[in-house]
Amino acid sequence: EPEVTQTPSHQVTQMGQEVILRCVPISNHLYFYWYRQILGQKVEFLVSFYNNEISEKSEIFDDQFSVERPDGSNFTLKIRSTKLEDSAMYFCASSAGGANTEAFFGQGTRLTVV
Amino acid sequence: AQRVTQPEKLLSVFKGAPVELKCNYSYSGSPELFWYVQYSRQRLQLLLRHISRESIKGFTADLNKGETSFHLKKPFAQEEDSAMYYCALSGSGNTGKLIFGQGTTLQVKP
């Protein structure tokens, strides 16, 4: 069964460094998402991506964040200058359609900023 | 504002007991509601959605627009039901963005 794959599973970085979180969505899916979950808190929407552009983003997704689909298979989330409060589990998801369509989630990348 | 509330962080029941995981939402339009589940060391996966009105693994959920609720129910809990359950609302527009509740850990004791 096809799955969304995220790498790495755990990333430790120093404050101020740039990180890139990688995701391979399911191949025939058209909608891509990033969510994050700070320890002990709810899963929060960051950004949705469709037709090679951002379709929606949350207030969390400020200028420090960017997304890219560089080669038609990978979907990346870049954090330009990490802060301690960026420490969280980051989930990638993809779906075949938009609203009301099942989203398939990756296993997550745990980002720890020290 | 769009919001999903799951009032219980932890629900602990014995095997064979009925289960009800509560979910309330706040949304101005016609909501699309989902339940996602995360078993230990596994990824988030869809359990059921209100639009399909189906029963999955014995679980059902009815959308009550008057009470703005979408509670998840199962008449007889099994140990393998132990997991984290998230209620989610599909936001406005067609992007498929999900707004999640805080999650409820269901613990089914033998």
Image: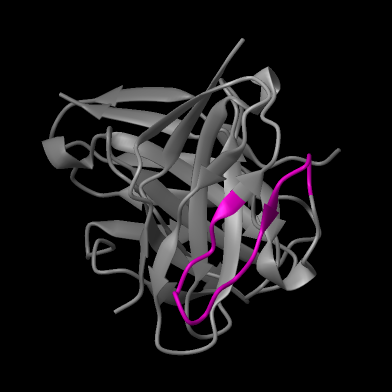
Magenta stretch: dominant SS?
loop
Residue visible at 24% across and 34% down in the picture: A87
Quarter of the rendering occupied by the C terminus of chain B: top right
B101 lies left or right of A82? right
Q: Is residue B66 magenta?
A: yes
Q: Foreground residue, A23 or B67?
A: B67
> Hey, which quadrant is residue A56 in on the image?
bottom left
- The reply to whether residue B37 is in sight is yes
In this view, the residue farthest toward the top is B110
Q: How many marks?
A: 0
Part of the protein shown in magenta? B56-72
Quarter of the rendering occupied by the N terminus of chain B: bottom left
Residue A104 x %, y %: 67, 50
A72 lies left or right of B6? right
Residue visible at 36% across and 25% down in the picture: A11
Against A45, residue B77 (above or below) is above
Q: Foreground residue, B5 or A22?
A: B5
Q: Foreground residue, A14 or B89?
A: B89
> Hey, which quadrant is residue B75 in on the image?
top right
- The reply to whether residue A72 is in sight is no
B54 lies left or right of A67? right
In this view, the residue farthest toward the bottom is B29
Residue visible at 62% across and 36% down in the picture: B18
Residue B56 x %, y %: 78, 47
